[in-house]
């Protein structure tokens, strides 16, 4: 489940990973204070910040970028992940977040989802953040949409 630079297809996500690696330096993970959203305007609308809450482990969406809201069709900023109204997205994303927190490694995947009769093809990276370099307390998630189409019709 670990991320290798060569696995990433999107130049924007590859650039964000390089930024994350630069900001962490010799530490295992950078802290939230090390990350300045103004440094990555090329992907900012496609970024989500997810707080990691403990005992029990839960996830709160601190920020859900404008482009994500537009593409996915729901605004989930400020919501707990288990409150997301799209079960297939919610359940998959919650599982991945738990795995990333347990393993402590960045993650990359790609996939497709049908939401409101639209196919969303995407690539995403999830990059852990830690304020104390001991425990992950936030996830920086960035999506890159490859193609969107309605069922039965292609569009770009």
Image (cartoon, rainbow, N blue to C red):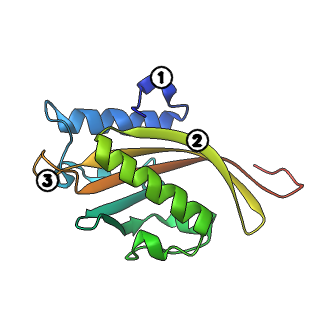
- In the picture, measured across the screen, residue 105 lies left or right of residue 5, that is left
Q: Quadrant of residue 81?
A: bottom left
Q: Residue sitting at 23 percent across and 33 percent down?
A: 22
Label 3–label 1 contact, CB within 8 A: no
Q: Residues within 10 Å of mark 3 (few under 14, many from 20)?
A: some
Q: Residue sitting at 49 percent across and 57 percent down?
A: 93
Residue behind mark 1? 6
Report the Cα–Cα distance between label 3 and label 1.
Answer: 28 Å
Residue 21: % across, % down = 27, 33
- In the picture, measured across the screen, residue 68 lies left or right of residue 99, that is right
Residue behind mark 2? 110
Is 93 situated above or below 64?
A: above
Residue 17: % across, % down = 36, 36
* Location of the N terminus (image quadrant): top left
Disc on res. 131: 3
Q: Residues within 10 Å of mark 1 (few under 14, many from 20)?
A: few
């Amino acid at each position: 489940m670990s991320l290798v630079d060569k696995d990433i297809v999107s130049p924007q996500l590859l650039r964000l990973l390089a930024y994350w690696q630069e900001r962490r330096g010799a530490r295992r993970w950078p802290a939230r204070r090390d990350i300045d959203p103004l440094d990555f305007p090329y992907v900012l609308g496609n970024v989500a910040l997810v707080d990691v809450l403990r005992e029990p482990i839960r996830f709160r969406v601190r920020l859900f970028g404008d482009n994500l809201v537009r593409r996915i069709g729901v605004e989930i900023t400020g919501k707990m992940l288990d409150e997301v109204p799209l079960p297939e997205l919610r359940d998959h994303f919650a599982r991945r977040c738990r795995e990333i927190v347990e393993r402590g490694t960045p993650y990359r995947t790609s996939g497709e989802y049908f939401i409101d009769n639209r196919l969303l093809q995407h690539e995403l990276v999830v990059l852990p953040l830690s304020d104390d370099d001991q425990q992950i307390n936030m996830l920086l998630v960035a999506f890159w949409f490859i193609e969107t189409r309605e069922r039965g019709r292609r569009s770009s």
